[in-house]
Amino acid sequence: MKNLGLVKTGQYHVTLYVITLLILFACSKDNDPSREEINEKLLAGSDSKTWLIISSTVNGTESLLDCVTDDYWTFKRTQQVTRQDQTTPCTNGFPNSQSSSWNFGDDGGWLTFFGGTYEIVSITENEMKLKFPSAGKTYIDTFVKK
């Protein structure tokens, strides 16, 4: 069998292996969105998204107050969030509407707003669970898309 310009068959295999690796790495998806970019879209949609809280547990025990269930939480892509009380205020003199900025930490694994930092337990197009420790207790709030 005639050698077609290759000195040794072993060099041919090494060269083929190197070329294959170069092609694989050249075709890798460097433009995949980060977890933060994905979570931002899930949290705020293309412009804004409004959420309702449906559950709030403290150490696994439900503790959701009726006055919170009608609050709308609107997260905007401009990194602004507004909590709007609809009908039942929790306390007299508490503002019906409050605004704050929001941002992610830990590459999208944590969400900070209204002075608190919350671990994103899960987030989908229609549901979000946030966890935060306070005074030796663990709180988990579940929101659904309005």
Image (spheres, helix red, strand yellow):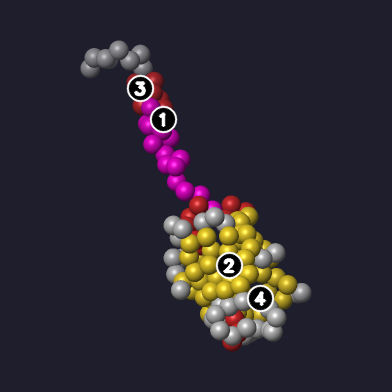
Report how far apart the C-alphas of labels 1 and 2 lie in the structure.
49 Å
Residue under pointer 1: 22
For disc 4, the neighbor class at 10 Å (few under 14, some 14 to 19, many from 20) is few
N-term mark: 3 or 1: 3
Residue 95 coordinates in the image, percent (x, y): 66, 75
Q: In the current view of this chain or complex, which residue is farthest to the left?
A: 1
Residue under pointer 3: 12
Q: Which residues are magenta?
A: 19-36
113 vs 50, left or right, is: right
Is 75 within the magenta? no
For disc 2, the neighbor class at 10 Å (few under 14, some 14 to 19, many from 20) is many
Question: Is 103 placed above or below 145 here?
Answer: above
What residue do we see at 48% from left, 62% from top?
48
Report how far apart the C-alphas of labels 4 and 2 lie in the structure.
12 Å
Nearest to the eye among marks 3 and 4: give it. 4
Nearest to the eye among marks 2 and 3: give it. 2
Report how far apart the C-alphas of labels 4 and 1 lie in the structure.
60 Å
The tag on residue 30 is none
Amino acid type, label 4: Pro
Residue under pointer 4: 95
Residue 108 coordinates in the image, percent (x, y): 57, 55
Q: Are marks 4 and 1 in contact (CB under 8 Å)?
A: no
Residue 25 coordinates in the image, percent (x, y): 43, 35
Residue under pointer 2: 82
N-term mark: 3 or 4: 3
Question: Is 88 placed above or below 10 here?
Answer: below
Amino acid type, label 1: Leu
Nearest to the eye among marks 3 and 1: give it. 1
